Amino acid sequence: QVQLVESGGGLVQPGGSLRLSCAASGFTFGSYSMSWYRQAPGKERELVAIINRGSWSATYADSVKGRFTISRDNAKNTVDLQMNSLKPEDTAVYYCNARRFGTVYWGQGTQVTVSS
């Protein structure tokens, strides 16, 4: 049974930091590229960051470049998203995603709210 379980969301003040984590099971984690997406109320889901299988390549949305860092641990089957200098516009549900060719898995999401 494939599972992607996100954790680490919550309420944080503008300028603060959060670290999201996604624990994967039920598939060959190291064979999949891993991504974080987010969806704000009334908006489409958007790609935040993606990291390739070997961790040597990561790509970020322009809106988060220089503030967010994606990383993965293929030994622990986890992928993290370190989020710094958070802004109110970062408020969204954040989803973990695994992709290999036509196979895609999604987590249930974790809420991140940036507000004073």
Image (cartoon, rainbow, N blue to C red):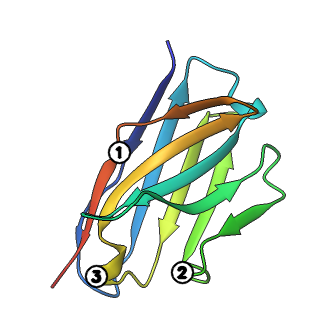
Real-space Cα distance between discs 3 and 1?
18 Å
* Residue 48 position in % (x across, y down): 54, 64
Check disc 1 and report the residue beneath it. Answer: 109
Check disc 2 and report the residue beneath it. Answer: 67
> CB of mark 2 within 8 Å of CB of mark 1?
no
> CB of mark 2 within 8 Å of CB of mark 3?
no
Toward the left, the furthest residue is 116
Left or right, 106 with reference to 10: right
Q: Residues within 10 Å of mark 2 (few under 14, many from 20)?
A: few
Three-letter code, disc 3: Pro
Write down the quadrant of residue 90 in the picture. bottom left
Q: Nearer the viewer, mark 2 or mark 3?
A: 3
Q: Earlier in the sequence, mark 3 or mark 1?
A: 3
Left or right, 85 with reference to 52: left
> CB of mark 3 within 8 Å of CB of mark 1?
no
Tag shown at residue 88: 3
Q: Residues within 10 Å of mark 3 (few under 14, many from 20)?
A: some
Q: Nearer the viewer, mark 2 or mark 1?
A: 1
User: Measuring 24% from the left and 63% from the top, which residue is drawn there?
Assistant: 41
Question: Judging from the image, what secondary structure is the residue with disc 3 in?
Answer: helix
